[in-house]
């Protein structure tokens, strides 16, 4: 009966089996007091190859995941082969090495009871191998001496099995986490799409309820005015005035909606005024701060003003939370070809001036505007952040 090839418990299982067999055979053929005839040597090699083939290829493919009867049959075949090798070797060399792989396989194939039975049979087989030619006292001593080695092999094999199972559990867990991460990423995309759809629906309702109302009312007033122009021209002015008033209200409503969509912390205020407010908030936290505006203040592109505001906000937040500074200096320079911002403190500094995720995000924001951002710091010497963004005509 063919069974599917099972997974290996250890990548070196077959090699370990081969090493043990080779070591035992080297001890046979190098024994000084034993000689073999050609037939004995050939028989010894053939039986050893059969034992090795069953213990490696046969074990992996036909025994490991087989029913209990096949596992028992494995030992019914292997134990006689070990006895045959022992007899052919004239009880010489380290023939007992051939028993150790069988003990290890027993720890893999059976439960505690089965492992105990295999271990006892192996120790008794070793004791009989020495006791038959040398007397029962030698056999008993050999059995008792061999027992600790059997226990060691069983414990070592169980540890290897536990390590293998733990490794596979970790691999399975890592795969599950990867799948969960992919699922969460899909959910995030779906949530974003859902939020976008909801926002579009909200905007559609806003347009329908507000702008649609005003356009409908204006159209009605214009129809009235058109009718009056044909019959009573003198009465057409009030509807026109009403339509004009509705158009102004509708335009105000559109501007209000756009302002809500484009909410900005600057709120139409001069950049220097908004930055001064941030500096006042820093002073309120107990840090002495100065704010200096150099050059001629002028209107800047909205995205540039927002970037300068965010850089200042992040820098002052870091000073307040992490710098342990007593004094900070903020300078906004309106140069001819560029606008520059410098934030400096006298805090504890850092040996990693690149900063964390916040500063990385600010650097990307500045680079998108074609500017540059530099950070400098040393432990105990404060922190300096400078940005420069060129101004285009």
Image (spheres, grey):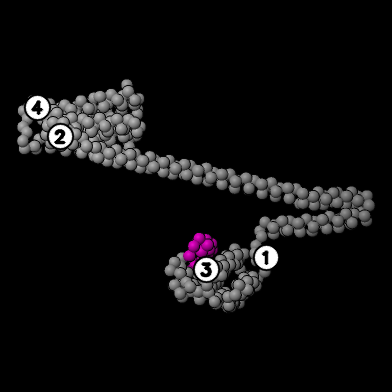
Pointer 1 with pointer 2, Cβ within 8 A: no
Q: Nearer the viewer, mark 3 or mark 1?
A: 3
Q: Main secondary structure of the magenta part?
A: helix
Q: Earlier in the sequence, mark 4 or mark 2?
A: 4
Tell me the distance, in whole angstroms, between the alpha carbons under discs 3 and 2: 78 Å
Q: Secondary structure at mark 4?
A: helix
Q: Nearer the viewer, mark 3 or mark 2?
A: 2
Q: Which residue is mark 2?
A: 138
Q: Which residue is mark 3?
A: 322
Q: Which mark is residue 40?
A: 4
Please identify the quadrant where the C terminus is shown: bottom right
Q: Indicate left or right for 350 with 316 as reference.
A: left
Pointer 3 with pointer 1, Cβ within 8 A: no
Q: Nearer the viewer, mark 1 or mark 2?
A: 2
Q: Which residues are magenta?
A: 355-374
Instruction: Residue 125: give x, y in percent of width and height.
Output: 21, 30
Q: Secondary structure at mark 2?
A: helix
Q: Earlier in the sequence, mark 1 or mark 2?
A: 2
Residue at the image position 22 percent from the left and 31 percent from the top: 124
Instruction: Residue 204: give x, y in percent of width and height.
Output: 71, 47
Pointer 3 with pointer 2, Cβ within 8 A: no
Q: Nearer the viewer, mark 4 or mark 2?
A: 2
Give the farthest residue toward the front. Answer: 137
Q: Is 171 situated above or below 307?
A: above
Please identify the quadrant where the N terminus is shown: top left
Q: Nearer the viewer, residue 257 or 135?
A: 135
Residue at the image position 26 percent from the left and 27 percent from the top: 75
């Amino acid at each position: 009966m063919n069974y599917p090839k099972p997974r290996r418990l250890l990548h070196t299982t077959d090699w370990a089996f081969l090493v043990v067999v080779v070591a035992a055979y080297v001890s046979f053929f190098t024994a000084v007091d034993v000689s073999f005839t050609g037939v004995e040597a050939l028989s010894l090699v053939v039986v050893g190859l059969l034992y090795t083939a069953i213990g490696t290829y046969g074990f992996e493919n036909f025994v490991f995941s087989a029913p209990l009867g096949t596992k028992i049959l494995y030992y019914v075949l292997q134990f006689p082969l070990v006895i045959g090798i022992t007899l052919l070797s004239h009880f010489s060399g380290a023939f007992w090495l051939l028993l150790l792989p069988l003990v290890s396989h027993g720890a893999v194939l059976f439960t505690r009871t089965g492992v105990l039975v295999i271990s006892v049979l192996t120790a008794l087989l070793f004791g009989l191998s020495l006791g038959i030619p040398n007397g029962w006292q030698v056999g008993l001593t050999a059995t008792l001496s061999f027992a600790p080695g059997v226990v060691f092999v069983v414990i070592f094999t169980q540890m290897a099995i536990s390590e293998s199972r733990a490794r596979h559990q970790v691999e399975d867990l890592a795969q599950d986490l990867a799948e969960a991460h992919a699922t969460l990423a899909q959910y995030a995309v779906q949530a974003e799409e859902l939020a976008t759809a909801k926002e579009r629906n909200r905007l559609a309702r806003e347009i329908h309820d507000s702008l649609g109302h005003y356009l409908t009312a204006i159209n009605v007033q214009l129809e009235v005015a058109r009718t009056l122009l044909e019959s009573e021209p003198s009465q057409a002015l009030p509807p026109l005035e009403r339509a004009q008033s509705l158009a102004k209200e509708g335009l105000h409503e559109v501007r209000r909606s756009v302002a809500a969509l484009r909410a900005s912390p600057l709120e139409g205020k001069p950049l220097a005024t908004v930055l001064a407010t941030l500096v006042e908030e820093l002073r309120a936290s107990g840090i002495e701060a100065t704010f200096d505006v150099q050059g001629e203040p002028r209107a800047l592109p909205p995205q540039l003003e927002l970037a300068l505001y965010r850089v200042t906000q992040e820098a002052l937040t870091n000073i307040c939370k992490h710098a342990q500074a007593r004094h900070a200096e903020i300078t906004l320079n309106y140069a001819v070809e560029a606008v520059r911002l410098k934030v400096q403190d006298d805090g504890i500094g850092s040996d990693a001036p690149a900063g964390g995720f916040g500063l990385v995000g600010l650097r990307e924001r500045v680079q998108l505007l074609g500017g540059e951002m530099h950070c400098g710091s040393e432990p105990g010497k404060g922190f300096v952040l400078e940005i420069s963004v060129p101004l285009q005509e």
